[in-house]
Image (cartoon, coloured by chain):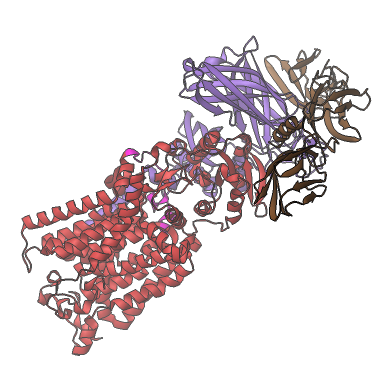
Amino acid sequence: MLFPEANVQKSESVVPHAREPQEHVLPQRAPVDRVTAQRPLPMSLLLLAAVAVHLPLLLMKLPLKSYDTNQHIFFASHYLHHWFDPWNPKWYAGFSQMTYPPLPQQWIAVVSHITGLDLAYMFVQLVAIMLLVVGVYRFAKIWVSPRAASFAALGAVFLGSESFLVYSAGQLGTTSAAPLYLNALPFLYDWVRYGRWRAFLKGAALFTAAAAAHHATLLFGSFFFALPVLALALVERNEGEEMSIAAFLARTISIMVVVGAAIAVVLLPFWIALIKYPVTQTPIPHASRANYLLSPEWGLNYFVVPYGALILALPFIFWRGAGDRRLRPLLLGFWVAFLVGLGGTTPIGHLLLGRAFDVITMERFSYWATLLALPFVGLFAQEIIASFRTRAMVALAALAMCSCALAVSWSTYHPADAADFKVDSSAAWLNRDGHDRYSYITLGFGNKISRLAMETNAPSEDGEWNSGRLLPELTKYGGAQLTSSKYFGKAGLNALRAILDHADHYGLKWILVRDRYYDPLLAFAGWRPVDSLDDKTIIIWAKDGVPPFTPVNAPQMPPHWQGMMWGILPFGSSIVALLVLLIPERRRREEEVIDTYPSGESLVPGRLAS
Amino acid sequence: MRLVRTLAAGIVLAAALPLLAQGGLTVPRTIEAGSAFSVQSSGSGQGTLYIVGPGQVLKRDVQLGSSVNFEAGALYNAGHYLVFLSGSGDTASLDVLPSSKVADVSFLARPSRLPVGLRDGITGAVYLFDSYQNLVTKPTTVDFQLSTPGSAAQNRNITTRDGAAWIAVDSSPKEGAAQFIARVGDIATKRIIGQVPGDPCGLQMTARPAGPKVALETAPVRDCSGNAVPDGTIITFTESFNGGQTTVDVPLKRGIAKVEMPAYPGATITVASGVVLGNQIRWGR
Amino acid sequence: MSGRLLALILFAATIVFVVIGTVWPLPEAVVFAGGGALANDTSSPQAALRSFGDDIHAQAWGKAYFSLANRAQFTLPQFMADMMGYYPNLRTYSGLDTFEIAPVHATDTDAEFHVKLHWATVVGDAVDNRDVHVVKNGDRWQVDWPFTKQPVLPPQVIPVNYLRWDVIYRGAGDDWGAADVEQPHVKIIDMHPVQRAEGTFIMGELLNEDVVPAYVSVTATLLNKSQQPIATEGSFDKISHLLLPKQVTPFFIKFADVNLSQVGGVRMTPFSTLIPASADPVIEVQDEKLDTSAVPSLSGQLVNQSGQIANVAHVLGTFYDQNGNLVWVADQYVDHALLPQTPVAFNIHIPEDLAHKIASQRTVISTFNMGGTA
């Protein structure tokens, strides 16, 4: 097992979890029952639960209906064919994929040799979900007992925000980086608190791999996840094995420097691209920045669905988090992430993030907040089950399943694309008779443009990865995908007009239209219908006299050495992390831990007897 | 490319002798494309005869010392051929000339549509080919004829040079679909040239009251040769009154354009088509 | 600090932050909330009008309708038709982008405002100007919407005998030497570069001198003094792309960030191709008035003389000086459908500094039928 602590029956006695014995009132039961009642759920059971819940959904390829899944597969398809050349000419008349950390997409490309791209995506996502279960368990165990941590890990299987990101948002980067990050945090704690070199190595390797999966997770995770862990180590410095402030600072700074350097090297082309071509685009409105009270439909989407039954646990989180000195750093981390995740409902996100508030989307903060809440949830589950046994288990299971079901089914009730249609005929049309000598855009295709880009050889000026855009016509206005211009109001339509105005510059000859709304603009701007597909649901408009497409943005093309780095280091970081994790933990005195992790401090024996 | 090769072959072979013995091979110096011929070899034993030329290769197993006959149609691409015999190393050359009989007239006529009465407005070019699509380089007379229904046909005879002949003729003053024919012997190729009316000439309109409006109607619109300007042509009526203006672009229907416009006493009404101005009317007070 | 106190502080702070975010929402959040708050503010005439505008922005038609003082005079569908039209047009699928309110006068019981509604249509900004009355009913102000009854076509049969051109291009089985149909002959009959603050503009006029309809566009390449290309731009929508025989269209090409002093030459490339087309609908431009006063404009009315509804009309005005030289080209999209024989007003803005030079103008109309082409 890569994470030895996950085997809770043999886990080391972790001093920080110890509490004053007098605080805990254990239920008066037979010794065997008591032991059973205090045991954590086996990791194998937790992983099986994750597989049982998510494998069928992934085999059904449910994430393909989400917002971003096809974009990740599109990136992966490019790595599949051009591993060492991150310049992708199929979007934005050419853009660099080095503007997005590549790890999950490169893994998809690798696995796709066996399974094909779609199933490879599902495989990588499933691995991320299973890693999350392990990561939540390990992270929660820093704060609460192994049994509570195991409940937290079980909660991760049914976590609404996880299902929301996987099946509705399709945020593979976030959902794969977070588990790596969570798994790294216990090593951070061990290193800072006890100075264990193995923990240093493993933590650094996992942090680097997490950054290679998603940079934002590492950046913001440092504040929401790592700071509470460091604060805990500081708070507990005098308990058990003592730690000086100097040691704390030295260890903290040393791992920060090493991890920072490793990330700087592994993602060097990314940083170069970011510095040379900073994201100075006009912000694009995103509903996660809405005020969820003024826009309740978005409140439902970005608060109720991701949190699910966790909303009911909020009072407990605040009450217990504030009441326990050890849990306060975690509570504060959760609270800030919670506030930022509320988007425009509070001014906190805007105050803390500044301009980044207008660039990144807020649902990931809710995701992180729910992950930070899970240790509390585990604690709550442990206590309520200890008190009410079967009734509590049934109630918790029902709530967890309802949360999960709502989030999974949300992609059906609130689909990313109202219309489900195939792009095969469009791709075939673009690929025949030399049509792919010219570039194209679509109108009314929604997030099918990623799938179309994968299937056609023709380049396009549109795309779904906004940070990769370099065309001034696109970056000047606050619209995102051209294919959905009308949903971005004046900004989107201005961007569309600007790109159509410069059609000759980009060899833009074809417009595949699936929304007649745009017809007047095309007709008055000099395009005319030349063909139709799929029973005339897709009309192809053409402009005469347009020269063939020639590559643009040439100055932005990364040099070959950067392509080599991009192909080797991020993927290599994950391999290194796997290898480092194989280094065995130092043998420690095995100790039964059951009695070290008592149940809640407010249990009432009388109720337990009932 | 084939044309160039054929021309080159024709020039080279112009003075060729009918038969030439070269080395141990006896081959005709020139033959007409597609005609039968034979090659005489010398020596004894078995060998393989190759005839290699532009776009065509022939290979025959031969008994050395015997004659090899090639049937009609075996060698049909005009040009210079190399003949060699494997084993003996004997080589010879052979020129295939295009047939003198024209089998196909390729006729390019431009443009497919033009205004009437345009001097040298129509060009035609012909290329003559034999039945094997070799360019016939022998000077041949081509009869060009441009005929428009209702007007006299124009006839010109042009002799080809290097297999091609061309001509420029005026479009007729009468509109209609002209037949442009290129004829060589009994082979004729026809193209249709659309001769369309020119700009309107002497554009005239009349006005009459129509209730609160003024009804404007043009006389049948014709060009300067008297051809009716085709329906669909835009006629622009403009009425100016007291600093205001009313404009309407009306397509011709059945040769005339008509429209009703506001009747302002003292208004000035003009009619135009493209850059051609018509008459002006001042609507009475 | 005790745990309970901390919990209470965090909980209270959360509530405070939510209240702040809701009472004074961030601009990013306002975009999705239609600019509004939880309840309509009707405490002042401006607030009532602004709430009404927010509702229109959010396409909360019912909420906007029921906030009106004079809603008894028309139904909700009629109100929606007043905003978007009964027949498909530019406004049908567009949303209200912004609105401007200018007070005209106010008393204790009523107020008058000039309201400019900016609709984000597919072809650009469409402005709807209304003079709006706001009245006080009890303690709340309500908008008295200036309802304009939309014309409705009576059921009828209109015979159509319009001209139509269809094209048969050469096919695979045609003789090698057979010519394809000739592309239409078009000619640039006027071209004039002008320097403005926004850059250099090339304007001119293009004539279809052929007897067949032409689909046209014009591309201009600016050359420097060494005759090297500086920039190439096309006419985009500042041209009527469909030209019937002998029809003339203006064209207008913008070169942002290019100064005319840099330009040593202009290479014009007109493009034309033959397309199927019809001569209908015929649009009459009535009562054109050139106003060169403080806010110069060309106004008039469009009348559809055909039986076919023209869903979108594009008005291109070409302006000349006393010598007939081209001075400016301007355009406007009409955001109401043109029903047969039903006048629809248009108003094209003219730059103030050019107005005094203009002596005459010419107007060209192109139309688009939903389900058809321009």
Image quarter in which the C terminus of chain A is found: bottom left
Q: Is residue C213 left or right of residue C271?
A: right
Question: Can you give x and y, in whole percent of width and height, for residue C292 in the image?
Answer: 58, 16
Side of C111 where B244 appears, left or right: right
User: Which residue is located at x 41 percent, y 70 percent?
Assistant: A54
Q: Is residue B166 magenta?
A: no
Which shade is chain A? red
The residue stretch that appears in magenta: A276-301
Q: Position of residue B123 (x, y in %)?
A: 79, 25
The residue under the point 68% across, 39% down is C373
Shown in brown, the chain is: B
> Chain in purple?
C
Q: Quadrant of the N terminus of chain A?
A: bottom left
When the figure is inspected, residue B124 is found, relative to residue A86, above or below; the finding is: above
Residue C25 % position (x, y): 36, 45
In the rendered image, which quarter is residue A591 located in?
bottom left
Magenta stretch secondary structure, dominant? loop
